[in-house]
């Protein structure tokens, strides 16, 4: 049965075109309509202090160009505010085991909140990666019935060095071990982008070519490599999350 409460979409991307495209992908692959969601772009003012979890069925957090591992004295005021806001929100989410799916930046924010070290040790170049499902992953309702290995689309400068204490590792990769984890029964994070398709990744390559994810002169080569890639099981994770908690 469909919930009468919307899915809260929290976005952190400063660029209108990229933020709008990310939101459209969340709708498309999550099986949502705009009216099923409450969209908040928090890259300017942070998370509202009066945000109440009881008003929503679930939370989905997108990616951002912010790096959690950046030294504190080099972080902007808005990044510091967003991180503090997320610590406040995640305290409620984890205590209540409230349905939550954080992708990329959402993964780092949840991982750090749970005590994992976030560093550049396991960064990955923008593109497609093949991940292995773990024993815990095979038992998880978002991944049940999946093949042993799935393809995902990603690109990140930082990641969790280890699975947070008390969390279950669901997907792991050769170049980045912590690709998806769950804490409690309903709080999830992915290092990859379950909402992204090839077109979306190509847009982000153009948008962030000078943000340190890759050498700028490699942008066209990276776009050509990802142009015909697909990640149907990654999309299925997003769709199952929505179906499980929204309906």
Image (cartoon, rainbow, N blue to C red):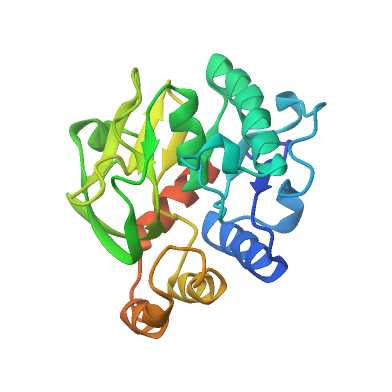
Residue located at (68% from left, 71% from top)? 17
The N terminus, quarter of image: top right
Q: Which quadrant of the view contains residue 134?
A: top left
Residue 62 as seen in the image, left or right of residue 205:
right
Residue located at (51% from left, 64% from top)? 211
- Asked whether 44 or 63 is in front, the reply is 44
Name the spot of residue 181 as percent of width and height, x first.
36, 34
Residue located at (43% from left, 23% from top)? 185
Name the spot of residue 119 as percent of width and height, x first.
37, 40
Q: Is residue 244 visible?
A: no
Residue 245 as seen in the image, left or right of residue 127:
right
Name the spot of residue 171 as percent of width and height, x first.
27, 42
In the displayed structure, would residue 189 be above or below residue 225? above
- Asked whether 43 or 99 is in front, the reply is 43
- Asked whether 237 or 102 is in front, the reply is 102
Q: Is residue 164 visible?
A: yes
Q: Residue furthest top?
A: 95
Q: Residue furthest front?
A: 73
Q: Which quadrant of the view contains residue 13?
A: bottom right
The C terminus, quarter of image: top right
- Asked whether 156 or 187 is in front, the reply is 156
Q: Which quadrant of the view contains residue 98?
A: top right
In the displayed structure, would residue 108 be above or below residue 125? above
Name the spot of residue 92 as percent of width and height, x first.
62, 19
In the displayed structure, would residue 151 be above or below residue 112? below
Q: How many numbered dots are placed on residues in this image?
A: 0
């Amino acid at each position: 049965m469909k919930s009468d409460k919307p899915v809260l979409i929290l976005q952190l991307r400063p660029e209108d075109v990229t933020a709008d495209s990310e939101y459209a992908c969340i709708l498309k692959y999550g099986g949502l309509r705009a009216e099923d969601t409450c969209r908040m772009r928090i890259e300017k003012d942070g998370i509202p202090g009066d945000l109440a979890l009881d008003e929503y069925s679930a939370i989905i957090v997108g990616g951002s160009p912010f790096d959690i591992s950046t030294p504190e004295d080099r972080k902007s005021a808005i990044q510091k505010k967003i991180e503090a806001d997320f610590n406040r929100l995640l305290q409620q989410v984890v205590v209540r085991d409230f349905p939550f799916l954080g992708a990329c930046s959402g993964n780092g924010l949840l991982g750090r909140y749970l005590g994992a070290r976030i560093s550049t040790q396991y960064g990955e170049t923008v593109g497609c990666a093949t991940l292995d499902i773990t024993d815990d992953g095979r038992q998880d309702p978002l991944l049940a019935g999946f093949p042993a290995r799935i393809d995902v689309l990603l690109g990140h400068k930082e990641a969790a060095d280890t699975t947070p204490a008390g969390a279950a590792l669901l997907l792991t990769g050769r170049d980045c071990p912590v690709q998806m984890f769950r804490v409690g029964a309903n709080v999830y994070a992915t290092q990859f982008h379950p909402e992204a398709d090839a077109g979306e990744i190509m847009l982000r390559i153009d948008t962030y070519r000078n943000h340190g994810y890759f050498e700028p002169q490699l942008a066209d080569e990276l776009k050509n490599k990802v142009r015909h890639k697909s990640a149907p099981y990654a999309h299925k994770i997003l769709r199952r999350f929505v179906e499980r908690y929204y309906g």
